[in-house]
Image (cartoon, rainbow, N blue to C red):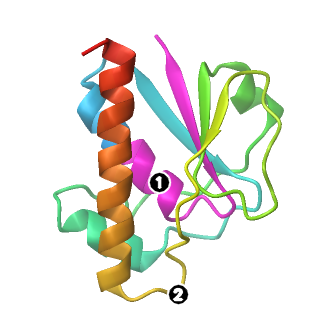
Amino acid sequence: MKTVLFICVHNSGRSQMAEAFFNRAAEGRFKAISAGSQPADKVNPVAAAAMQEVGIDISRNKPRLLTAEIIKGIDLAVAMGCENACPFTPVETRDWGLKNPKDKPIEQVREIRDEIKNRVDNLIEEMTGK
């Protein structure tokens, strides 16, 4: 099964949202995981609230550290916005350059969430050839 890794610095907002959207849309055809170069203690509560609005609960997810072990099993890496911390991966790596939802009001986080969903939907279409 092809695996996509979504990466952001804290793995508490953008990459968590992307992982959740991807896994829901992939319907078991592909898999997503997420990680960060400097993971936070918990998921951004505003990002979790924005996802709850679309029926996805990420509030109990735990941010995880990006490790060589995680990178070994992936087919594609998507950085959410490197912020001068772009990781090296041995596979194709794309940077979506999204704004960081940290310390943003819910209105702005919703915009980021919706942009992530659109990009994830496009990625799934690309991967399925539709």
Q: Residue at x 49, y 59 (%)?
A: 14
Quadrant containing the C terminus is top left
Identify the residue under disc 2. Answer: 103
Disc 1 to disc 2: CB gap under 8 Å: no
Q: Position of residue 78 (x, y in %)?
A: 59, 39
Q: Position of residue 79 (x, y in %)?
A: 63, 47
Q: Is residue 48 visible?
A: no
Residue type beneath disc 2: Asp
Identify the residue under disc 1. Answer: 16
Residue 113 numbered tag? none
Q: Residue at x 39, y 66 (%)?
A: 112
Q: CA distance from mark 1 to mark 2?
A: 16 Å
Q: Position of residue 42 (x, y in %)?
A: 55, 69
Q: Is residue 19 magenta?
A: yes
Q: Earlier in the sequence, mark 1 or mark 2?
A: 1
Judging depth in this view, the residue of 76 and 16 nearest the camera is: 76
Secondary structure beneath dot 2 equals loop
Camera-near label (1 vs 2) is 2
Q: Residue at x 37, y 44 (%)?
A: 119
Answer with left or right where residue 75 lies relative to residue 2.
Answer: right
Q: Position of residue 11 (x, y in %)?
A: 60, 58
Per the rendered image, the range of residues in magenta is 1-20
